[in-house]
């Protein structure tokens, strides 16, 4: 009799995914429409900053764990006062239970949010709206923090970034040789 290995069932988290996507979109919608709701910069900034903080916290502490099985955090050594970053990912068996659809949506949202906020920051600076550039500057800082934290946790993302860098370097080398 042959033994058949059954792949572990991937568990989905549709509510977490929906909340994650909505919380990523909410600060963008607030930022783009805030002048329509209120002309008071301080109120608009605070509302956007709170929405960004909620998005950052849920991405770091909920979505990363449930959707991709990754987490990171910072510890302060009580004796030396040194800051230490910790990065964790599930083992291979645990990662096999992560939904490919949710994993793809998670990474697309992380990269997309970083790119989108960068475009909004450049737009605000180009329009000389320096006050309103503070919101996307804060957003880029938080988005890059989450992105770097999760890339350091994820072996797959590290490999993809390494392959991308290697590919870009080799293309540049071949382009310079071909001249």
Image: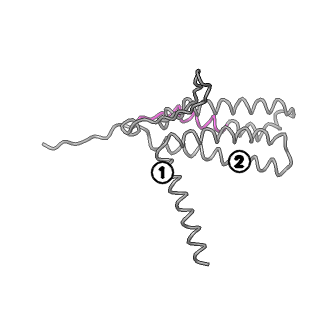
User: Going by the image, does 104 lie left or right of 81?
Assistant: left
Where's residue 164, x and y in %? 53, 57
Residue at mark 1 to residue at mark 2: CA–CA distance: 24 Å
The overriding secondary structure of the stretch rendered in magenta is: helix
Where's residue 125, x and y in %? 81, 48
Disc 1 secondary structure class: helix
Looking at the rendering, which quadrant does residue 40 occupy?
top right
User: Going by the image, does 123 lie left or right of 8?
Assistant: right
Observer-nearest residue: 73 or 146? 73
- Give above or below for 123 relative to 173: above
CA neighbours of label 2 inside 10 A, class few (<14), some (14 to 19), many (20+):
some
Observer-nearest residue: 149 or 80? 80
- Give above or below for 168 relative to 133: below
Looking at the rendering, which quadrant does residue 98 occupy?
top left
Quadrant (top left/top right/bottom left/bottom right) for the C terminus: bottom right
Observer-nearest residue: 153 or 69? 153
Question: Is 14 covered by the magenta stretch?
Answer: yes
- Give above or below for 162 relative to 20: below
How many marks can you see?
2
Observer-nearest residue: 72 or 57? 72
Residue tagged 2: 118
Q: Which mark is residue 159?
A: 1
The residue at the far left in this view is 1
Disc 1 vs disc 2: which is toward the camera? 1
């Amino acid at each position: 009799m042959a033994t058949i290995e059954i792949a572990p069932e991937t568990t989905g988290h549709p509510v977490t995914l929906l909340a994650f996507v909505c919380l990523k979109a909410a600060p963008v919608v607030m930022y783009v429409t805030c002048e329509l709701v209120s002309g008071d910069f301080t109120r608009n900034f605070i509302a956007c900053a709170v929405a960004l903080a909620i998005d950052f916290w849920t991405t770091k502490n909920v979505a990363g764990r449930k959707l991709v099985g990754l987490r990171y955090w910072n510890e302060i050594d009580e004796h030396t006062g040194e800051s230490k970053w910790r990065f964790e990912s599930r083992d291979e068996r645990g990662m096999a239970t992560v939904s490919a659809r949710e994993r793809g949506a998670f990474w697309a949202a992380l990269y997309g949010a970083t790119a989108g906020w960068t475009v909004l920051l450049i737009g605000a600076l180009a329009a000389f709206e320096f006050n309103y550039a503070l919101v996307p500057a804060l957003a880029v800082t938080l988005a890059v923090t989450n992105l770097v934290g999760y890339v350091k946790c994820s072996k797959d993302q590290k490999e993809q970034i390494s392959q991308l860098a290697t590919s870009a370097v080799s293309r540049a080398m071949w382009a310079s040789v071909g001249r």
